[in-house]
Image: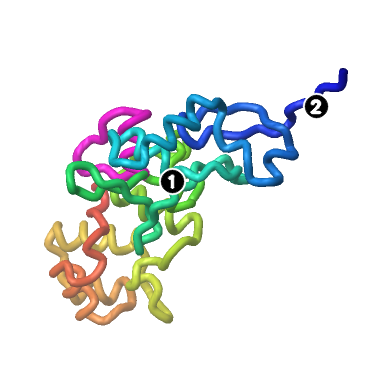
């Protein structure tokens, strides 16, 4: 008796466990669940359930080349969203909390895969606002800080960090401007926090 081998790896749309399926079933859009039990549980869970079930139900069962878990409920920002007790929470933050533990106050959740809708826990990592910005720039995603993006910009984060230290130490604005070949108004704006406000003072 010939038995067809199950050669296609799938992720159960309900419990998120990996299982093997027939390629023929995959081709016709079947093979979404690992067992009949998960089929029944999924069909009975159309009403609002607990957050973990809602979270898993909104993850696409389609394979992703990078192994991402693509969240299907997307906001205008491009990030996934889940509602818990009438409060919208970013799906990738929920995923990190669920699988990796509590997120310390003030920290961001960054994507190693650079896919906003991904909620795979092993693709997420903790970072500060600076870490998040540097990660974005290294991957050439989004725009560089507008000050650094201006044509013929004379300054960068390192130079501005040094300028802030000089200002802290009481050096004259006119002397700093001359040293860095910029107008004094540029130094004034840096001191007031109008531009480059996110750059920290260099270490002495």
Which residue is painted at 66% across and 32% down in the image? 9
Q: Is residue 28 left or right of residue 44?
A: right
Which residue is painted at 17% across and 67% down in the image? 193
Residue at mark 2 = 4
Could one spot residue 95 in this view of the protein?
Answer: no
Picture quarter with the N terminus: top right
- Which of marks 1 and 2 precedes in the sequence? 2
In the image, residue 203 sits, relative to residue 4, either above or below, namely: below
Indicate yes or no whether the magenta region holds residue 143.
no
> Measured from the top left, where is residue 63 in percent x and y?
60, 43
How crowded pointer 2 is (Cα within 10 Å; few <14, some 14-19, many 20+) is rated as few
In the image, residue 146 sits, relative to residue 126, either above or below, namely: below
Q: Secondary structure at mark 2?
A: loop
Q: Residue furthest right?
A: 1
Which residue is painted at 19% across and 48% down in the image? 87
How many marks can you see? 2
Q: Which residues are magenta?
A: 92-109
Which residue is painted at 29% across and 50% down in the image? 129
Q: Which mark is residue 111?
A: 1
Q: Nearer the viewer, residue 33 or 16?
A: 33
Could one spot residue 201 in this view of the protein?
Answer: yes
Q: Nearer the viewer, residue 120 or 168?
A: 120
> Measured from the top left, where is residue 141 in percent x and y?
47, 61
């Amino acid at each position: 008796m010939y038995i067809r081998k199950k050669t296609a790896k799938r992720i159960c749309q309900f419990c998120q466990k990996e299982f093997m399926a027939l390629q023929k079933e995959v081709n016709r859009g079947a093979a979404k669940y690992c067992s009949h039990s998960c089929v029944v549980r999924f069909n009975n869970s159309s009403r609002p359930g607990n957050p973990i079930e809602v979270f898993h139900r909104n993850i696409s069962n389609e394979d992703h080349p990078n192994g991402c878990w693509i969240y299907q409920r997307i906001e205008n920002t491009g990030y996934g969203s889940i509602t818990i007790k009438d409060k919208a929470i970013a799906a990738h933050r929920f995923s990190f909390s669920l699988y990796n533990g509590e997120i310390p106050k003030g920290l961001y959740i960054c994507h190693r895969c650079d896919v906003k809708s991904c909620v795979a826990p092993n693709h997420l990592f903790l970072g500060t606002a600076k870490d998040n910005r540097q990660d974005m720039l290294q991957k050439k995603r989004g725009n560089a800080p507008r000050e650094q993006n201006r044509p013929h910009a004379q300054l960068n984060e390192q130079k501005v960090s040094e300028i802030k230290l000089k200002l802290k130490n009481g050096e004259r604005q006119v002397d700093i401007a001359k040293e860095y070949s910029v107008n004094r108004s540029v130094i004034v704006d840096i001191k007031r926090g109008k531009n480059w406000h996110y750059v920290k003072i260099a270490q002495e």
